[in-house]
Image: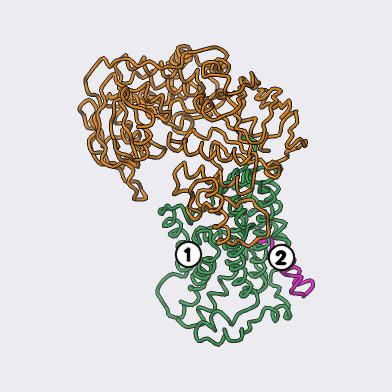
Chain colours: A green, B orange
Amino acid sequence: MDISFFTAAIVAGTPLVYAILGELITEKSGQLNLGVEGMMLIGAVIGFKVAIVTSNPYLSLLGAIFAGGIGALIYGILTISLRANQIVTGLALTIFGAGFASFTGQGLIGEAVPQNIKLFFENFQIPFLGDIPVIGPIFFNQGILVYMGYLSTIIAGLYLYRTQIGLNLRAVGENTAAADAAGVKVSFYKYIHVLIGGLLCGLSGAYLSLVYIPSWQDNITAGRGWIAVALVIFCKWNPFLVLCGAFLFGGLDIIGFRIQKYEFNISQYLIDLLPYVVTIIILILISARKSQLGAAPANLGATYFREEK
Amino acid sequence: MVNISKSFNNVEANKNITFCVNYGEIYALLGENGAGKSTLVNILSGVYRPDSGEIYVHGEKKRFGDPRDSINSGIGMIYQHFKLIENMTATENIILGQKLGHIINKKKLRKTIIDISEKYGFKVDPDKYIFDMSVGEKQNVEILKVLYRSADILILDEPTAVLTPQETEKLFKILLKMKEQGCAVILITHKLQEVMDISDRITILRNGEVVDTVQTSETNQKDLTAMMIGKSIDLSIERHPILEKEVILEIKNLCLVDRDGVKRLDNISFQVRSGEIFGIAGIAGSGQKELCESIQGLERRKKGQILFKGEDIARLTTREIFERGLRISFIPEDRLGMGLVPTMDIVDNVIMKDYYLQKGIFLDRQPARIRSEYIVKILNILTPGINYPVNRLSGGNIQKVLLGRELDSNPDFLITAYPTRGLDIGSSRRIYNELNRQKMKGIGILYVGEDLNVLLNLCDRIMVLSQGKVMGIVDASRMTNEKLGFMMLGGKE
């Protein structure tokens, strides 16, 4: 394996970074949003559409982020204010997102991202860090969104574990009643972080359609949203582990292409299965281990009624 | 609080309740379960909104829309079921919900917390995780949480329910210190002794209404009981002599290691005779649950021997035990989770125990209906009918359904875990009487309890567990509260 494989694994893993981070922050508030795939698709198609129409990278990203946020907001209203079942609502959001993306993207198939946007996302080397042998070319000779991915995980980690707001947020997810009794505005916290999750998923979708592919195709996410949901568990709800999980799976994602030139006698389909098989294995391994720390927020997926007796 | 009223689904939990508390006083709200104490304090802490009535703090009228408003008025609530986050440290729990925007400064917080705890004379390790703490330590964290917010009105809801006598004593010392510092302390309880020991004034609630407010120095336990219950009843529990002497259950060297590799039961051996009530005492989580489930066949990881009528049942499942004709009945502590299916009616819950003995594909409900009618009648269960979902019944009636079903199968042995938890004095009495009746029939009874007075009065012998180890097996008639508490904390006899 050469260095270019690892460089490509980072690129392939970046959409996962944003999606995992988004879902992780959402889950910290106790909300289980299975609509990641849907929000990614909505973000991807809106981002692409805006790119074709305006040729402006900033507007495209903003459009995608905004679109993901709208998806999350729908989920939030249904589950937080109207107290609908979180699982069903999340699944509905995924199905809705897939339909919406297919429908909106009908005329976009085959179109390519405008040249100036491609240029905007071009790789550039970070001074000093980029000069380190091996690590430099792999991590610090990438596009702007990859660097933003690194930064987001660090910010998220500090936010969750070093600030009062982060503490309150974790309390909401762990024991909603206790947080409420301590005077934390539970619904407000849930809304904000469901929304942040949606914004990040929208951005993740935009990375796929604008940078990674970069043209429009149907079902552009190809199950990455679901892998992200599973990887939140892999990362033990810890933002500092998000990069490991995402890049590992980025590598698994592209290993199929890379392996072709060595002429192994393995079916291409089996190799394409790898990320999904590894996901299942990891989930089994993790559920076999039971420990207080590094477990899911205790009130994840639970609907909260204050006056419930 | 003036004229507070609140109802749930047309049940009036509080009717025109008025009381006042002064600073520098310990004030007790006394009442049976369902008297409306908890509802009242939940209104005061902003969790429930009253249907009508007004709250004044420092003479100022307040409206509590949510717990935040109440906290800001200087009211600190210590809930019966602790509102703590298990996998956070003491410090994190204490500062939860404080002003936003601060980066957490651990060193400074540590010092503040240690300062406060020293001022009131208790010990808390700020970096300890809640899941590592004993019940007493958890309560200390709850109290610190309130003090950290410099609350001057403290409400404690049944604070001693889960404490040993020693821990209770420590708590009371802290409360007295707070009183000295000029705080108002509101103590909610149904334990008369504690009220007499520590409070200055008492308000008695019954059926959601204020019965009376009295000075502690001018009253006694008997009068208080009469006011709580509405009539004077005998609080003592009878203990009948053991009639038979034959050993029905013998446990030899029972060990259990759970899936996390933690030793839950450590070399436990004891004997229970038929016609004996064998008590098990210990602070929560000392292995009581594991022991009950081991005997009953639910727990599969155990090692050692369980001889029931001379037959080793340690390797058998619950159903295999049942099919061999060994009648062991189990009343688990989690009655709606493990004991009964909450949304099903009495008939379906009754049929569950032996439905598979019936022939054919379809269930015949008729025999179960007759049995249900019988159980309802004999145990005096208050229900609109046998086809009424059990989770809509009151706690006492739910317990009676479970007890009725288990006794209906004519057991030789009965395992009960906290059978009167959450029940009022009247219902508890009926359960104790029923247990005594079964004892007279020659049934061996394993009674896991938490109220030491009940254990001492009801049981013949008591085994004390601490961290899965037997601290001693003692004769209940020659034991005191304090000695039992000492052993529960791990002190050898």
Residue A293, horizontal then vertical, whole percent = 47, 55
- Under circle 2, the secondary element is helix
Q: Quadrant of the N terminus of chain A?
A: bottom left
Residue B358, horizontal then vertical, whole percent = 37, 22
Q: Amino acid at mark 2?
A: Ala
Residue most extreme to the right: A54
Nearer to the camera, A236 or B141: B141
Residue A244, horizontal then vertical, whole percent = 50, 69
Q: Amino acid at mark 1?
A: Leu
Q: Residues within 10 Å of mark 1 (few under 14, many from 20)?
A: few
Q: Which residue is mark 1?
A: A273
Same chain letter for marks 2 and 1: yes
**Where is residue B271, by image quadrant?**
top left
Residue B61, horizontal then vertical, whole percent = 78, 35
Q: Residue at x 41, y 71 (%)?
A: A266
Q: Residues within 10 Å of mark 2 (few under 14, many from 20)?
A: many
Nearer to the camera, B445 or B125: B125
Q: Which residue is mark 2?
A: A64
